[in-house]
């Protein structure tokens, strides 16, 4: 039995302020054709650098195909945030944007240092076997409303990719866990970035996430 689960989350903090799955046809063109982002898009057990590059490429391809949105820049601190979120999920045995009782934004502390305004978004997914390849994960994200909205949100400027392969998670072996960390902040820090070519959730949002998880459970 194979399994694939997804969840998405967004939040924003602005200055002086606190705190349905779509049909396939309209969004198939957003998924990069096979080989566009290299052969890694169909592979398992990637190293961190390869995983970050291929998922960033798939993400930016979707953005450029959707009204020519500007590509997102990979940010090392957001990569670290993504890996920290997934590691906490594995450590606590939960599939959540707030694992181990930590707040959603806790993993972004280094990225947000010095920022006066910011916007954050996160997609997470995990799958076993071929359901955990970059291409399969991106396909499912693009055909799920909340995840696609994060990928195509024009306000985001930077991206982090979290990736944990070959995990034993929630009773399954061979799990691949993925995250996309979307962000923008002001002022922009001097953190190193690289361009890759082609305050809390409300109850309603939590309910939508739970519903979405059920939709993507597969035997």
Image (tube, helix red, strand yellow):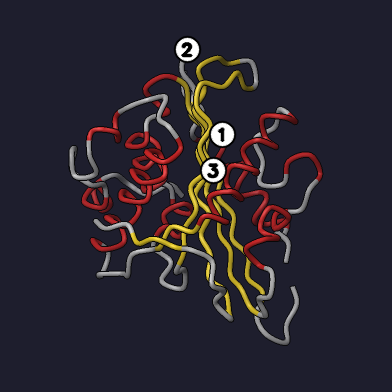
Residue 77 in the figure: left or right of residue 49: right
Residue 55 sits in which quadrant? top left
Q: CA distance from mark 2 to mark 1?
A: 16 Å
What residue is disc 1 on?
Answer: 214
Whichever of labels 2 and 3 marks the residue nearer the N terminus, that label is 2
Mark 3 vs mark 1: which is more N-terminal? 3
Q: Residues within 10 Å of mark 2 (few under 14, many from 20)?
A: few
Q: Residue at x 67, y 29 (%)?
A: 90
Foreground: 176 or 94?
176
Q: Residue at x 60, y 46 (%)?
A: 209
Select label 2 or label 1 by which is in front: 2
Q: Which of labels 3 and 1 is toward the front?
A: 3
Q: Residues within 10 Å of mark 1 (few under 14, many from 20)?
A: few
Q: On the image, numbered disc 3 is attached to which residue?
A: 124
Q: Which residue is mark 2?
A: 1
Residue drawn where x is 70% and y is 60% of the image? 109
3D distance between C-alphas at marks 2 and 3: 21 Å
Residue 9, placed above or below residue 84: below
Residue 18: x percent and y percent? 75, 77
- Residue 31 in the image: state x and y as whole percent: 26, 47
Give the number of callouts.
Answer: 3
Residues at marks 3 and 1 touching, judged by CB atoms closer than 8 Å? no
Quick one: SS at disc 2?
loop
Residues under numbered marks 2 and 3 in contact, where contact means CB atoms less than 8 Å apart:
no
Q: Residues within 10 Å of mark 3 (few under 14, many from 20)?
A: many
Which mark sits nearer the N-terminus, 2 or 1?
Answer: 2
């Amino acid at each position: 039995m194979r399994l694939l689960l997804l969840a998405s989350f967004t939040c924003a903090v602005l200055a002086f302020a606190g705190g349905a799955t779509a049909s396939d046809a309209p969004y198939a063109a957003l998924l990069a054709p096979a080989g566009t982002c290299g052969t890694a898009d169909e592979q398992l057990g990637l190293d961190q650098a390869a995983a970050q590059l291929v998922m960033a490429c798939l993400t930016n391809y979707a953005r450029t195909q959707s009204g020519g949105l500007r590509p997102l820049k990979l940010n090392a601190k957001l990569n670290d945030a993504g890996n920290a979120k997934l590691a906490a999920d594995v450590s606590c045995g939960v599939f959540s944007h707030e694992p181990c009782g930590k707040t959603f934004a806790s993993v972004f502390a280094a990225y947000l240092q010095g920022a006066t305004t910011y916007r954050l978004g996160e997609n997470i997914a995990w799958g076993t076997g071929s359901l955990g390849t970059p291409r399969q994960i991106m396909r499912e994200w693009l055909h799920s409303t909340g995840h696609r909205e994060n990928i195509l949100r024009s306000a985001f400027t930077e991206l982090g990719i979290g990736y944990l392969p070959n995990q034993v998670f929630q009773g399954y072996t061979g799990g691949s866990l993925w995250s996309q960390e979307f962000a923008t902040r002001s002022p922009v820090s001097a953190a190193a970035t690289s361009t890759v070519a082609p305050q809390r959730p409300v109850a309603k949002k939590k309910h939508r996430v739970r519903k979405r998880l059920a939709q993507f459970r597969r035997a």
